[in-house]
Amino acid sequence: MILVDAVFVNNGGGKVLLDYLVQTIEENGLDVFYLFDKRNLNDPKFTSLKHKKFINGTFYSKIKFYYSNKLKFNKIICFGNMPPLKKMNAVVYTYFQQKLFLEIPKELGFYLKIKLFLKSIIIKNLKKNTNFWIVQTSLIKTQLSKKFNIIENSILELPFYPSLKSISNTTSIKKENIFLYISNATSHKNHYRLIEAFENFYEKFQFGELYLTVYDNIELINFIAKKNKSNIPIINLNKIEGTELEYIYQKSKFVIFPSLSESFGLGLVEAIEFNCIIIGANLPYTFEVCTPSLSFNPYDIESIEESFHKAMNSDYNNTIPKVSNKIKDILKILNND
């Protein structure tokens, strides 16, 4: 039997990919037991599964589960960046998708930096408990190998992601003045510089609307509200998914992506699917996924502002995608005895 260990995964891009993996596994009838984080207990996609268990997102809960089931599984895929806490009598694949364990941006708060540093030490000590690693890009493969001294042959580059267009076949005419950024509000997502740059641009040219999806940061939500009071057209959609997410991509001509650190940049892949013009940070993760139509220095407000100006004047080339979905290869790994 296969174990999918998804403890610690309950939001963001990781949750989107987990949902997709579970859906694909179920559609293909694999014999899988799922270990979920208790924070997903009310998710109907998970509660309806036949073989599953919800546990607290703690090391104690995980080690207790593994000792109680040490001979039950012949294959394990750990979906939360971290190998099992003990050596298992099984072939283990660890899906690694958190670049912050490899490189910590200076913008992050002190306590988060300490947390990431300590977790990176734990990962280094647990690397002996996994046979293979799965990553989304060659950049993460190289950085993971270097950071934790892992043989590159044991790191499999297998990007996978869901298609939003499978939800419905509706179409929408793109609005020329919409700039969209789909992201949570952690500090490395770089919302404050983006908003300041858009405000400067809008005050000069009275063009554009900036759409955001901030729902998990009261300080940032209040900051957006303050800009709204100054008649800066920033529309906060809060948390959206499903058909709502599909609709806003269909409607938006531009997707701007100023994040300071990404392992993959799921929002870039989604934007490509809906033929959006991508305005991306001139950082390596962007160019792993695509050649953007425009790029900018995400640390420089003036550079971000200039990218808005170029977009307004249609001073850009087409976005060129560079990745393809390898979900079938993931299934082959799980299917092989």
Image (tube, rainbow, N blue to C red):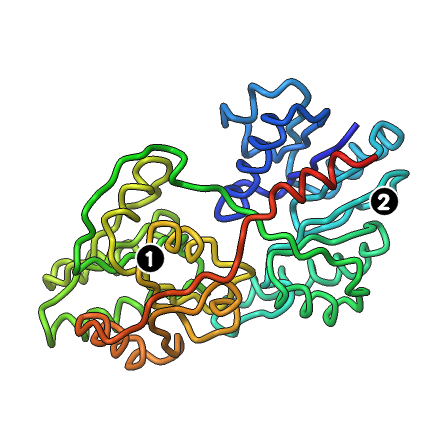
Quadrant for the N terminus, please. top right
Residue under label 2: 86
Instruction: Indicate the position of residue 311 as horizontal and vertical percent values.
Output: 23, 71
Give the crowd class for mark 1: few <14, some 14-19, many >=20 residues within 10 Å: many
Secondary structure of the residue carrying tag 2 is loop
Residue 246, image quadrant: top left
Looking at the image, which residue is at 17% across and 74% down? 313
Instruction: Indicate the position of residue 205 as horizontal and vertical percent values.
Output: 10, 73
Residue under label 1: 181
Q: Are marks 1 and 2 in contact (CB under 8 Å)?
A: no
Locate residue 102 relative to residue 196 in the image: left or right.
Answer: right
Q: Is residue 159 above or below residue 281?
A: above
Secondary structure of the residue carrying tag 1 is strand
Locate residue 146 relative to residue 254 in the image: left or right.
Answer: right
Q: Is residue 222 above or below residue 199?
A: above
Q: Nearer the viewer, residue 275 or 214?
A: 275
Q: Nearer the viewer, residue 70 or 208?
A: 208
All told, the count of numbered labels is 2
Looking at the image, which residue is at 60% across and 61% down? 137
Which of pointers 1 and 2 indicates the residue nearer the eye? 1
Quadrant for the C terminus, please. top right
Give the crowd class for mark 2: few <14, some 14-19, many >=20 residues within 10 Å: some
Instruction: Indicate the position of residue 16 as horizontal and vertical percent values.
Output: 50, 42
- What amino acid is found at the position of numbered circle 1 in the picture? Tyr
- What amino acid is found at the position of numbered circle 2 in the picture? Lys
Q: CA distance from mark 1 to mark 2?
A: 40 Å
Locate residue 225 relative to residue 190 in the image: left or right.
Answer: left
Instruction: Tell which circle, 1 or 2, labels the residue nearer the N-terminal end.
Output: 2
Looking at the image, which residue is at 49% across and 23% down? 44
Residue 50, image quadrant: top right
